[in-house]
Amino acid sequence: MIEILVGTLLGVALGTVSGLLPGIHANTLAGALLSLQVVILPVLGPVALAATMFAALITHTFVDSVPSTFLGIPDADTALAVLPAHALCLEGNGEEAVRIAALGSACAMVIAVPLSVLCYFLLPALQPMFDWGIGLLLVAVIGYLIVTSESPGWALALFFTSGILGVFTLRYGFLGWHSMGAGSALLMPLLTGLFGISVLLTASHGKMPVQRFTGISMDGGSVAKSSVLGTLAGIAVGWLPGLSNATANGVLASVIGYQKDRRAYILATSAANTANAFIGLAALFALSRMRNGVMVALSAITLPPASALFVAGVVAACAAYIITVTLSRSAHLFSGIEGRRLHGAVIVFVVVVCLLLTGPFGGLVLLLATLVGLVPHSVNVPRMYCIGAVMVPVMLYSFGIAWT
């Protein structure tokens, strides 16, 4: 228990740092820890090292709502959620948006842990059927979203254009600099260009409004419904191969809609983000499949029992909730900041981080993704359809169409 506690505390600290820095993910930290395991293992031991990696991942799923809300920059897990969260910030409700996200993640922890245990025992026998049906499910979901959109032609064009860019990025991902696999590393410039920089370039450049918090404007029923929907979406994409939180965000958009009920959408996507982390651990132990970079790193070391890591995750979630709520109280510091300067500084920082982590090829992906991301604003189409960058490669993978 001492090793688990030490590792959890270290993971919470590292996850807080990665969550606050745009472009830095828990996968990056896991890769760094794995590369230094020769030095770290004699000091921490394998149990503490594994607990550190998993606790950092759980903490990151809470804290990453802070930069997403106030800076408008997503990571791979907050691609669509950043849009309503930053919109609330621009209305002076940034603290509320962060608190809603933290609440969603906390609710997901309560629901996802027992569900993950059930999945561990019940779902492996059904895995072949799941592997076959993923593509059909995604086709049905995106088909519904496109047909019901106000501009189906533009929606379809944007979906496939971003999808081609996603396939290109993953196909030639070996050209980037990375330590945890081409796909996981290059999602950063891909999604940041589509949902981050392109948004900042077209955003209002006036002063940030005064940030006030008067409570969370959601009733108990809405909180419960959004928590369950988000957790189930996170469980589904975390267990099924090839899917990600970005896919969950797209699916949830068809059920909730990030423009109709922004607060419910923020809560649901945050729940999906945290649930995905817990079910990813269950999939690792049950199927020996790695759903993200942290699981890849964990598979490379001597693993403690799954129960030990779940304990570390629950403790980390409790600590991360307190940290995230505390950080949300700093919203007033953004009041009155000149939007042009803030957005410019964020863009420069993200470009530098992108080039450092993924090299010139990552910079090219960032540029192309930003250009595609400017299209929705120009033709007045929801940015959600840019999620094709993730969905199209998954569809091709499911249908056995080689693109790597």
Image (spheres, rainbow, N blue to C red):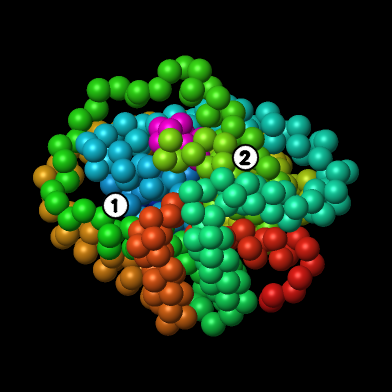
Q: Which residue is mark 1?
A: 71
- Left or right of 160, for residue 332: left
Q: Main secondary structure of the magenta part?
A: helix
Q: Position of residue 235 (x, y in %)?
A: 65, 40
Report the amino acid beneath label 2: Ala
User: In which quadrant is the N terminus drawn?
Assistant: top right
Q: Residue at x 32, y 52 (%)?
A: 72
User: In which quadrant is the C terminus drawn?
Assistant: bottom right
Q: In the depicted view, which residue is nearer to us: 396 or 290?
A: 396
Query: Where is residue 88, by image quadrant?
Result: top left
Q: In the depicted view, which residue is nearer to us: 221 or 314?
A: 221
Query: Where is residue 242, by image quadrant?
Result: bottom right
The secondary element bearing badge 1 is classed as loop
Q: Residue at x 39, y 48 (%)?
A: 82
Report the amino acid beneath label 1: Leu
Q: Is residue 266 magenta?
A: yes
Would you say residue 239 is visible in this rendering? Answer: yes
Q: In the depicted view, which residue is nearer to us: 6 or 109?
A: 109
Q: Position of residue 296 (x, y in %)?
A: 64, 60
Earlier-in-chain disc, 1 versus 2 = 1
Q: Position of residue 338 (x, y in %)?
A: 13, 53
Q: Is residue 22 magenta?
A: no
- Left or right of 266, for residue 175: right
Q: In the depicted view, which residue is nearer to us: 298 or 150?
A: 150
Q: Residue at x 35, y 23 (%)?
A: 217
Please give the range of residues in magenta. 261-270
Q: Residue at x 35, y 37 (%)?
A: 98
Residue 192, label in figure: none
- Give me the C-alpha separation between circle 1 and circle 2: 26 Å
Q: Which residue is mark 2?
A: 233
